[in-house]
Amino acid sequence: MRFKKHLEFESGHLDIAPLIDVVFLLLIFFMLTSSYIFQPGIKINLPKAVTSEVIQEKNLIIAVSAEDLIYLNDKPVTLNQLREYLQGFSKEDRPLLIKADRSSSLGKVVQIWDLCRDVGLTQINIATNQSME
C-alpha cells in the first residue's frame, strides 16, 4: 500500500450567499410561527357595571370561572388551599381582586368573599367591565 507523502490543498472560493439565504429563511420561519403561539389563560366574561372604577395597584387575583372553578393567580386551587394561602397573604396590606364570570354562581363568590373576610382581608374588590350606557 502506497501513501502520498505530499498533499496538495486547493485554495478555492467559498460562496456564503446560499448560507445567508438559508439563515434568512429560517429566521423568517421562526418569526412567523412564533406569532401564532397562544398564551393559556382563564376565559372570564366579566359583568358590566356603571359605577366601576380603575384600580391601579398590584392585586392578588382570584378568578372564578363559569364552571365555578377557583384560580389563584391563574393556578387552580381548592377552597382549603385558598384559605391557607390567604392566611399568609393577610399579613401584607395589599388589595385583593375577585374576577368572577357572569355565569358563575353568586354563592361561590360570596363563599370566597366570606373566606377572605374570615382570614382578615379588608380590601376586597370585584372586577367588572365598565358599561357603555
Image: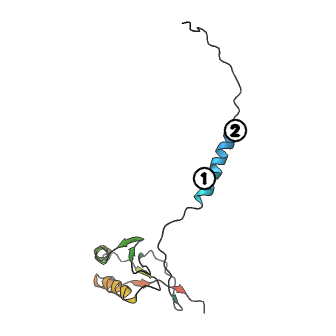
**If you read the primary sequence from the N terminus, does the residue marked by circle 1 or circle 2 appear first?**
2
Image spot of residue 122 (x, y percent): 35, 84
Quarter assignment of residue 131: bottom right
Report x, y in % for residue 72: 38, 73
**Quarter of the image where the N terminus is located:** top right
Estimate the spatial distance between the alpha carbons at disc 1 and disc 2, rounded to whole Å. Answer: 19 Å
Kind of residue sitting beneath label 2: Pro
Q: Residue 119 in the image: x percent, y percent?
A: 28, 81
Place of residue 39 in the rendered image (x, y in percent of width and height, measured from the top left)? 51, 65
Q: Residues within 10 Å of mark 2 (few under 14, many from 20)?
A: few
Q: Is residue 35 above or below residue 66?
A: above
Residue 81 falls left or right of residue 58: left
Along the viewing direction, whichever of 133 and 31 lies nearer the viewer: 31
Residue in view at x 63 percent, y 57 percent = 32
Query: To which quarter of the image does residue 87 belong?
Result: bottom left
Q: Quadrant of the C terminus?
A: bottom right
Name the residue rendered at 66%, 47% in the picture. Answer: 25
Q: Residue furthest top?
A: 2
Q: Is the residue 12 above or below the residue 21 in the image?
A: above
Q: Which amino acid is tagged 1? A: Phe
In the picture of the structure, the residue carrying the numbered disc 2 is 18
Asked which secondary structure carries label 2, the reply is helix
Q: Is residue 3 left or right of residue 85?
A: right
Which residue corresponds to mark 1?
30
- Which coloring applies here? rainbow
**Observer-nearest residue: 108 or 115?**
108
Residue 38 located left or right of residue 70:
right
Q: Quadrant of residue 116?
A: bottom left
Q: Residues within 10 Å of mark 1 (few under 14, many from 20)?
A: few
